[in-house]
Image: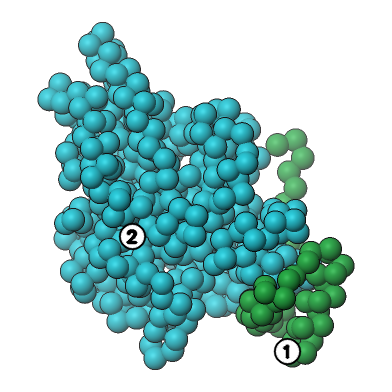
Amino acid sequence: MTPDQIEKYVDAASAALELPVSAAHRPGVLENFTRLAQLAALVNEFPLTPEDEPAPLWKPGV
Amino acid sequence: MKSMDALGIAAAIGAGRISAVEAAEAALKTIDALDGKIHAFTAVTRERALAEARAIDNARAAGHPLPPLAGVPYAAKNLFDIESLTTVAGSKINRDLPPAKEDSALVARMSGAGAVLQGALNMDEYAFGFTTENAHYGTARNPHDLTRVAGGSSGGSGAAVAAGMVPLTLGTDTNGSIRVPSSLCGIFGIKPTYGRLSRRGSYPFTCSLDHVGPFARSAADLAAVYDALQGQDTRDYAQARRAMEPTQQLLKEGLGNLRVAVASGYFRENAGPQALAAVAAAAKALNVSREIILPEAQRARAAAFVITASEGSNLHLADLRSRPDDFDPAIRDRFLANALTPVQWYVQAQRFRLWFYHAVMRAFADTDVIIAPATPVAATPVGADTFELNGKQLPARPSMGILTQPLSFIGLPIVAVPVHGLGPLPIGLQVIAKPWREADALRVAAALELAGVASAPVAQL
């Protein structure tokens, strides 16, 4: 994500979640979201197959 | 008393050389004398300690057999429920909650084993950090150098043991929060297999990754307390339905036929010179030359980061909306950013988790135990925003766990083993075993101790 995309996403997502981000917190939030996006990109670019299911498993009856 | 280990104290009480009340009073005196400098404790449970100790002394006087940790002082990270105390989990916000109605599963197990609770311990707010620089409760200081951090998030648990306040503590490890303070404070700790010990009554951080476990100053103590903490708890959904698998008697088997390798690749590239020297010392002592690569460890760390971001912030969303300024400023902006994690990232990270688990199990096929550094560097100065690793500046708070995070991601059992004498401060190793094979890791830890590589001396204060 570009810095511009991150700003737009953070503003839109915080509005959608009704999670106010004050002007005082915004620079820190953008910095932290940027780091998170960089790390997520490492995961998202990795090729997985349909057989690679999510790790959590529901265990009825347990 | 201060340098006695847990089994030594239990033996002395069993033999009548000291009473449990004397042991409790000695621990309380040490805590009173040192904690103004260390800030390991956030509450001291003096009355409970003396009452539990008197019960042990009365049992002995009545001729009853004593449980395995009878009279041994210990303390618990302040996210474990302690009956009649509010479980603050390092936060200001949780002070509004009512006191716990009953002990958490692990505190109850410790009581059942005869151990004597001395108090609750400092931590990063909501377990989100690796330094225990807590805006509400102060910074847990490293007993080996008070200008440096004790690590986190179980920093009080590491510091209390290293300072000789208590020989045993309880902590939690989501991304490294037992192994990092063990490394920085130079003590032993174990993060068992995910689902091994009951988490009931421990304030959660990231359900998919949360583990609970103990700290100690010797491999034998660690095995003894780990054994005492095992047992089924039908009220913990995440606990695996497995029989107890005691380890204490297996330590004397030594290394035996265990196949040991050293982790290379990511675990070498992200380690500083002292961490590499510790690995080399262990490899030499165990006569290990084989190296192993755990594939895609960097991506595993990233995926653990994404899962932590999503689940950790979800838990606090209501408070992030209504009272963000009551969070520790050190983590508030991270929590706010994390609450915005797209769900596609989260699901992808959970899918990658299963891929990585299978890849690691393939790499592990002809090996029983892998040795890796626990932290890239030794304890950093209090207040440091960054530390240098091989010429690069890394953000201190999230980066101290870069070597622990890929492994808790898939729930492997790991013993943190302390190595002193390679620099002014100690540093730790991770001794990693296959799922449910805690005993293998503890045997290697004991072998390293016997070889003189691992030790956990009480800090000189």
Q: Is residue B391 above or below residue B224?
A: below
Q: Are marks 2 and 1 in contact (CB under 8 Å)?
A: no
Residue A10's image quarter? bottom right
Residue located 63% across and 39% down the image: B97
Q: Is residue B268 visible?
A: no
Q: Nearer the viewer, residue B5 or B268?
A: B5
Q: Amino acid at mark 2?
A: Arg
As measured in the structure, the alpha-carbon distance from the residue carrying label 2 to the one carrying label 1 is 37 Å
Q: Chain of mark 2?
A: B
Taking depth in this image into account, of B251 and B119 the one nearest to the observer is B119
Q: Residue at x 61, y 34 (%)?
A: B98
Judge left or right: residue B393 versus residue B284: right
Q: Residues within 10 Å of mark 2 (few under 14, many from 20)?
A: many
Q: Is residue B131 above or below residue B73?
A: below
What residue is rendered at 24% in x and 25% in y? B20
Q: Chain of mark 1?
A: A
Residue B86 appearing in the image: yes
At a point 55% along the width and 78% down the height, the residue shown is B298
Q: In the figure, what tint was chain A given?
A: green
Q: Which residue is mark 1?
A: A3
Chain (cyan): B
State the residue in front, A15 or B117: A15
Q: Amino acid at mark 1?
A: Pro
Q: Which residue is mark 2?
A: B141
Which residue, as the protein is rendered here, is positioned at the far left? B17
Residue B89 % position (x, y):
54, 48
> In the rendered image of this protein, does residue B297 appear above or below residue B407?
below
Q: Quadrant of residue B141?
A: bottom left
Residue A40: image location, x then y, percent = 68, 77
